């Protein structure tokens, strides 16, 4: 037995037991690495463990949001809906953990506070808030891109005396709103999914909205046995399409067919035809136009169509106007999907407070005071998102070479090579880190690609007696420049766009575009080429 003051030793320490951490355990075992996963939650599942708010579900077809590494797993699992809800996805995560006995290499209720690199020993020492220590040559951060909840700095926030909830920290026990007055701050993805559900039972729901969002109908429906059988017969084709696509999706969904991305330009379609398509297909008709994502004139045409749709669904003209996005382009934020979102605002027990007109002055012990009115409720819900991409990483005090802190190195925005490593921090890997497709893609495809690349890299080092790998500064600088160059010219970086991709939702966070927009397929080719060239751009020692 080791001395009680000595850290537990492994080949790999992994932080996070979401879908990344789970797959890393399976990969490490298959390659002969001992590993331990440190997870602050009480079980596996990551984002699906924490985000239990009403209406939470996948925003892409769930058949595509699943592991591909085991054909038997693919064949034995049956999804019930096209867009799976949170309870089913968490059940899937638990099934995978049970099937591969993953929990025996995991420590739950364990929050990592610090990690430091010993340059002489080429080892990381990881410390938890409970004082436990672990050491390993390799440290992998599988902390997730959307895992640190964002609490807005509103005057009086601590004074509220009713029930407080955050969509990203939802209780594990059932929450009911029967007979209760509810206020919800935010109209991002979690709010758009939860508002229709909460409105079903709340006495009254006040929605406090700063920026209206663009959202598309989820087009969700139960899956038939015929559809599931077709999927199981075509998994290989679907996975190949995913891995070489732009966003990690084969678009295998509607009526069991692979959906082609449109190539038609909206500026070349007359107004009458655009209206006809809107009437027939609804908002999904906007997906067929290739120029909407790259041309501001085309985008504004699509925005006009979008606002026309909202006006046609929402009965009250003032409410409809409040819900219409303006002054920023469609596609500058992650696409939100919903079920009956706009229809919910036709209910008598739902009202919207347009914070563009009447901003919040303070939170009071009984509710919210805007500049012109007082609102009282029994429950206050924060649907205010996350400190995305970097928040969970910067929460850990990570010390690399020469005593440098990663959060200091990233003070002007995150800098990585391929989203996998940051110069000055040897043997520290990030899964779906800043500078990789991550949140611009089907996360499961990006997760598997990163987990496989990282573990193959560790095996390469071991088999050739290398002890350390580190991104070089020139390679990192070149990649950061490339990430920015590819994003320029898209709706994602226009001046009017204030998205969490840019850190704009967190006061004081540097405005830097963090994910890689060049596409999952192109990114995979680049990573494979780097590995094939004996890890070009990395220093091996």
Image (cartoon, helix red, strand yellow):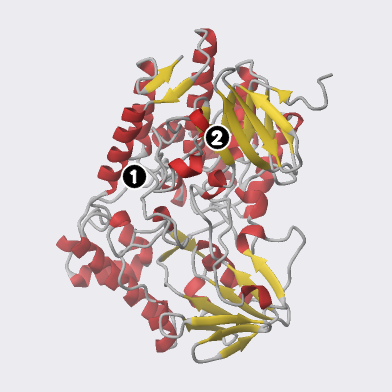
| Label placed on residue 399 | 2
Position of residue 70 measured from the top left corner of the image (x, y, whole percent): 59, 27
Which mark's residue is nearer the viewer, 1 or 2? 2
Work out which quarter of the rendered image holds the N terminus and state it.
top right
Report helix, strand or loop for mark 2: strand
The quarter of the displayed image where residue 100 is located: top right
Name the residue nearer the viewer: 421 or 129. Answer: 129
- Answer yes or no: is residue 482 visible: yes
Q: Sequence-wise, which precedes: disc 1 or disc 2?
A: 2
Crowd class of label 1 (few under 14; some 14 to 19; many from 20; radius 10 Å): many
The residue singled out by tag 1 in the image is: 517
Residue pictured at 50% horizontal, 64% vertical: 338
Report helix, strand or loop for mark 1: loop
Position of residue 68 measured from the top left corner of the image (x, y, whole percent): 54, 32
Q: Is residue 327 left or right of residue 208?
A: left
- Answer yes or no: is residue 70 visible: no
Name the residue nearer the viewer: 90 or 260. Answer: 90
Residue pictured at 39% horizontal, 19% vertical: 535
Name the residue nearer the viewer: 264 or 243. Answer: 243
Q: Is residue 191 left or right of residue 175?
A: left
Position of residue 157 measured from the top left corner of the image (x, y, whole percent): 62, 74
Q: Residue furthest top?
A: 464
């Amino acid at each position: 037995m080791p001395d009680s003051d000595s850290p537990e030793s492994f080949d790999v320490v992994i932080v996070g037991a979401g879908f990344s951490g789970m797959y890393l355990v399976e990969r490490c075992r298959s390659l002969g690495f001992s590993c331990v996963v440190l997870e602050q939650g009480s079980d596996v599942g990551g984002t699906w463990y924490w985000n239990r708010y009403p209406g939470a579900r996948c925003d892409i077809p769930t058949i595509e949001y699943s592991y591909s590494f085991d054909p038997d797993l693919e064949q034995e699992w049956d999804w019930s809906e096209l867009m799976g809800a949170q309870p089913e996805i968490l059940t899937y995560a638990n099934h995978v953990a049970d099937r591969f006995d993953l929990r025996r290499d995991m420590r739950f209720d364990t929050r990592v506070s610090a990690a430091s690199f010993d340059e002489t020993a080429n080892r990381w020492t990881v410390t938890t808030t409970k004082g436990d220590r672990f050491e390993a040559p390799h440290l992998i951060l599988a902390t997730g891109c959307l895992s640190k909840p964002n609490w807005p700095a509103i005057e009086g926030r601590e004074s509220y005396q009713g029930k407080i909830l955050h969509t990203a920290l939802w209780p594990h026990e059932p929450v009911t709103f029967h007979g209760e007055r509810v206020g919800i701050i935010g109209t991002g993805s979690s709010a758009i999914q939860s508002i229709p559900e909460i409105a079903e039972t709340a006495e009254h729901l006040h929605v406090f909205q700063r920026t209206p969002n663009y959202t598309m109908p989820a087009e969700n429906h139960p899956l038939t046995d015929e559809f599931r059988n077709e999927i199981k017969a075509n998994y290989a084709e679907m996975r190949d399409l995913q891995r070489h696509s732009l966003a990690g999706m084969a678009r295998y969904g509607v009526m069991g067919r692979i959906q082609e991305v449109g190539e038609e330009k909206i500026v070349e379609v007359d107004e009458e035809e655009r209206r006809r398509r809107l009437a027939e297909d609804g908002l999904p008709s906007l997906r067929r136009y290739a120029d909407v994502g790259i041309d501001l004139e085309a985008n504004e045409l699509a925005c006009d169509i979008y606002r026309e749709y909202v006006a046609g669904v929402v009965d009250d003209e003032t409410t409809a106007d409040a819900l219409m996005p303006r002054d920023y382009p469609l596609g500058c934020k992650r696409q939100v999907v919903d079920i009956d979102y706009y229809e919910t605002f036709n209910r008598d027990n739902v009202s919207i407070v347009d914070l563009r007109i009447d901003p919040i002055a303070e939170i009071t012990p009984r509710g919210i005071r805007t500049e012109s009115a007082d609102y009282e409720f029994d429950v206050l819900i924060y649907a205010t998102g996350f400190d995305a991409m970097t928040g969970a990483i910067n929460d850990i005090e990570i010390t690399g070479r020469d005593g440098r802190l990663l959060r200091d190195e990233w003070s002007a925005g995150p800098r990585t090579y391929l989203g996998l490593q940051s110069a000055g921090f040897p043997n520290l890997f990030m899964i779906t880190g800043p500078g990789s497709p991550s949140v611009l893609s089907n996360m499961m495809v990006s997760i598997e690609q990163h987990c496989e690349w990282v573990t193959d890299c560790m095996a390469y080092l071991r088999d050739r007696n290398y002890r350390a790998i580190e991104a070089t500064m020139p390679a990192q600088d070149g990649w950061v420049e490339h990430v920015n160059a590819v994003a320029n010219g898209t709706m994602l970086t226009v001046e009017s766009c204030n998205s969490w991709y840019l850190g704009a939702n967190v006061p004081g966070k540097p405005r830097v575009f963090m994910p890689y927009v060049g596409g999952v397929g192109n990114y995979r080719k680049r990573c494979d080429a780097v590995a094939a060239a004996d890890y070009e751009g990395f220093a091996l020692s």
